[in-house]
Image (cartoon, grey):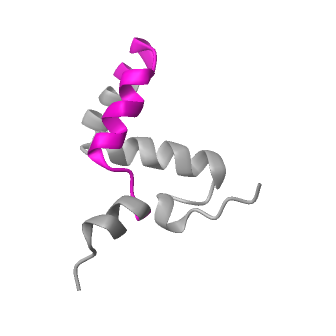
Amino acid sequence: MQPTADQETREHLSPVASRMILAALPDEIREAFERRSADIEYPVEAVLEMALASFLDNESLSFSDCKPRY
């Protein structure tokens, strides 16, 4: 069964949300996310999600397995 669009946006960072976050970042940071995304051939929203999830739970790879302890 395919996840619904609503379920997908609750479990993963959407492309729209990632563009909004990137637009709010300093150019140097935004460019670093974009370079990392290109280097590992992942969408930039996945790279942002991994960074945020890892900040909250260093054992997680995405929001789906993030279990913040704070």
Q: Position of residue 42 (x, y in %)?
A: 27, 46
Residue 29 lies in the magenta stretch:
yes
Q: Which residues are magenta?
A: 11-31
Image-based side of 44 in relation to 32, left or right: left
Image-based side of 52 in relation to 4, left or right: right
Task: Please give the name of the residue rendered at 42% of the width and 64% of the height, measured from the top-left corner.
Answer: 11
Q: Quadrant of residue 8?
A: bottom left
Q: Nearer the viewer, residue 70 or 47?
A: 70
Q: Quadrant of residue 31?
A: top left
Q: Position of residue 53 (x, y in %)?
A: 55, 51
Image-based side of 51 in relation to 40, left or right: right
Residue 41 lies in the magenta stretch:
no
Q: Nearer the viewer, residue 68 or 59?
A: 68
Up-down relation of residue 24 to residue 52 (above or below): above
Q: Quadrant of the N terminus?
A: bottom left
Task: Please give the name of the residue rendered at 38% of the width and 51% of the height, measured from the top-left corner.
Answer: 13
